[in-house]
Image (cartoon, rainbow, N blue to C red):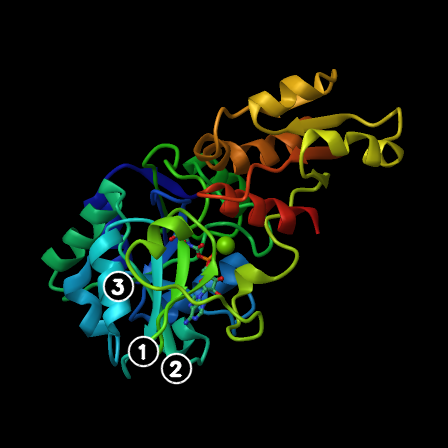
Amino acid sequence: MVTITDSARQAASALAADQLVALPTETVYGLGGLATSRAAVERIFAVKGRPVDHPVIVHIDGVSSLAHWTASVSPAALALAEAFWPGPLTIVCPRADAVLDQVTGGQPTVALRAPSHPLFVNVLAELSALGIEHPGIAAPSANRFGSVSPTTAQHVIDGLGEYLAAGDLVLDGGPAAVGVESTIVICTDHTARIARAGGITAEQIAGVVALESVAAESVRVPGALASHYSPQARVILLDGVSDLAEIADQIADADRIGLLGLARDLDTVGLDWIQLARPHNSAEYAHDLYAALRTADEIGVSKVIAILPPDEGIGSAVRDRLIRAAH
Ligand code: TXA
Ligand code: MG
């Protein structure tokens, strides 16, 4: 039985004892372990069922800890950290020698982010109070590999409860505010390239540094596997309501269909299907997305028809996750 708590101090004590703690962040819940503990990091991979060569993000307390975890910090990386930390931005930098291979997947780089969720911030402060300088918490999203990321403590328990051990904890910080994962920016040379769309938009990043477009083969990012974030139900995508006729043949009369899309699009469709979520804008779409995909499985719809939001702002991250969920 895994214990649920809202105590950052209890969470820090468990982490310091090499236990795992599922932690709230502003994006999604993470499955955390001390990034300097080989035993803890190995358990993260086991509990997630994640391939060992997939690197994990190290969560740190801010810009002042960047140098501790990296071999060098480019001007772009520093500018981005100063602009968007704490917040949903992950920066990939050349790693410091001491960073565990288990964390980096054996790559010469490390992914770093300073989350803004107040409970997470408190956990890092409590670790410092325990004498751990520049604490780092390795934390992938707290779901089994390939399935939908958790945005509540209950989602974590539903997905990982049976895999966690006595002594592990779930720190309940309420529903995640953003709802999709952090934006990943690669800053391993003088350039900055987005490797995963997320909570900080490309427009925001381009306001701080010059962005290069990413060559698909340039970086291995497991979140970039074609199939990911997948519910049991089949996900069918629509890029605008006018495409509805094109998918009519994919929908048998007997199908129980779940609908997901912006309220204005659902109103245009006007069909009598189960509405899984009807967000009013792309930020709400991001916030509701994963819970809606879970609802689809809970109520047992066979197909989810998702109407994509416009490809701008955080809508780009929503589209990215839906396209992977549909693969
Ligand atoms: O919002 C988030 O980023 C959440 C919360 C918990 O912080 N975490 C998250 O972790 O989404 P995960 O493991 O599900 O995705 C981390 C992504 C993976 O796609 C991984 O490949 C990439 O970060 N990544 C980690 N280290 C990397 C590195 N050194 N180089 C390139 N990509 C890296
Ligand atoms: Mg994940």
Q: Residue at x 70, y 34 (%)?
A: 304
What's the mark number on residue 108?
2
> Amino acid type of disc 3?
Gly
- Image side of residue 244 versus residue 275, left or right: right
| Separation (CA) of disc 3 from disc 2 | 17 Å
Place of residue 124 in the rendered image (x, y in percent of width and height, measured from the top left): 20, 54
Marked residue nearer the N-terminal end (1 or 2): 1
Helix, strand or loop for disc 3: loop
Measured as percent of width and height from the top left, residue 190 is found at 32, 77
- Whether residue 147 sits left or right of residue 46 in the image: it is right
Tell me if I can see residue 158 in this picture.
yes
The percent position of residue 213, horizontal first and vertical second, equals: 48, 66
- The residue identified by callout 3 is 136
Q: Looking at the image, is mark 3 or mark 1 earlier in the sequence?
A: 1
The answer to whether mark 1 and mark 2 are in CB contact below 8 A is yes
The first of marks 3 and 2 along the sequence is 2
Label 1, label 2: how far apart the Cα atoms are: 6 Å
Can you say whether 165 is above or below 54 in the image?
above
Checking the image for residue 95, the label placed there is: 1
Q: Residue at x 70, y 21 (%)?
A: 269
Identify the amino acid type marked 2.
Answer: Pro
Determine if the C-beta at disc 3 is less than 8 A from ligand 1.
no
